[in-house]
Amino acid sequence: MRFLWILLLLAAQSCWAFEAVTPGRVLRFPADYGAHPEFKTEWWYVTGWLNTADGKPLGFQVTFFRSATGQGKNNPSAFAPRQLIIGHAALSDPAAGKLAHDQHAAREGFQLAFSKPGSTDIRLDDWRMKRAADGSYTVNIKSSELQFDLVLTPTQSVLLQGEGGYSQKGADPGNASYYYSEPQLKVHGKVNGKAGPRTVTGTAWLDHEWSSQAVSTEAVGWDWIGANLDDGGALMAFQVRDKQGGKLWSHAMLRDRGGKVTQFGPGQVSFTPQAHWTSPRTHAAYPVATTIKTGDTSWQIIPLQQDQELDSRRSTGAVYWEGAVTIQRDGVQAGHGYLELVGYVTPMKL
């Protein structure tokens, strides 16, 4: 019943007027590191590659969602369900053969679940992500499936996606989000999954997006990658898919090792599947190995392991593939990142 209540509140969002994303807004920090409750949907999304003390690779994902319900705005009660806080966490370990993952959801309130304005500070019971004054993040996840105690330290400046942080997701200018990334985060700490506690180091990527209507009603899903390149560069690319599996919109951004940023519009970005993996649980066929073209450059995407499907039907209602991948540039090893494949089981709705 708890998650039925959550889904009912999510369905009620459509009747509420939320703030719109418009071009020209200047992102301001540190305020924009924090929550934006006047918008419908928001997420802080950390993915990365880790190495254990004996050199074994692991992938990890932590995502916190804030979702405005459209309810209780003028209700003074502390029980009014104005915002939902949702969390996903996953550990990709090839030795296990599939993800260890968990999900959590609660209405905001009583200092047990919140996402604070002003700077990144999110709590969901025993799940927490907080930004310190020096720009580093602590990420703590405690559940029966896995535990993370990680520190993420920035090594580069914020990367504003799109036009100064205005990231268009369709031909309609209203189909957009405010979006920035923090690539090349240095990671150290501990993880605990099926194989027990391990000390880890590595590199991560953080995305923060907020919007009220990011994608067109014609969209059924998207493919996205964020990759930390071995030379210190960063690559982000995505495509939004229509009901026939074609491309509604795409975009990519490359920041090279010297800090030069190149953007690629819809006509310059393509995703071409090279191999599919079919889930034994949902029977969805995911293009887990793919070639992405940005202008004249080809990027080959290779998964750390095939089964990186995450079932979040108890929280957001979606099943998606979210996996650690290596990336080659024109056939030469170039970096590591995460590939997200959404809408292959059922059409995705924000």
Image: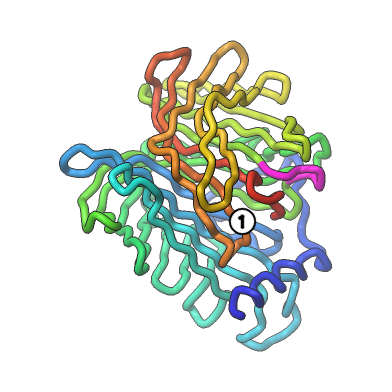
Q: Residue drawn 74% across and 76% down? A: 71
Q: Residue drawn 50% across and 25% down? A: 255
Secondary structure category for the residue under label 1 = strand
Prevailing secondary structure class for the magenta stretch in the rendered image: loop
Between 223 and 21, the one nearer to me in the picture: 223
Q: Position of residue 281 (x, y in %)?
A: 52, 53
Residue 56 in sight in this render: yes
Q: Is residue 165 left or right of residue 151?
A: right
Q: Is residue 23 left or right of residue 37?
A: right
Q: Position of residue 221 (x, y in %)?
A: 68, 43
In this rendering, is residue 108 above or below 155? below
Q: Amino acid at mark 1?
A: Ala
Per the image, is 218 magenta? yes
Q: Is residue 283 left or right of residue 184?
A: right
Q: Which residues are magenta?
A: 215-221
Per the image, is 129 magenta? no
Q: Position of residue 37 (x, y in %)?
A: 65, 64
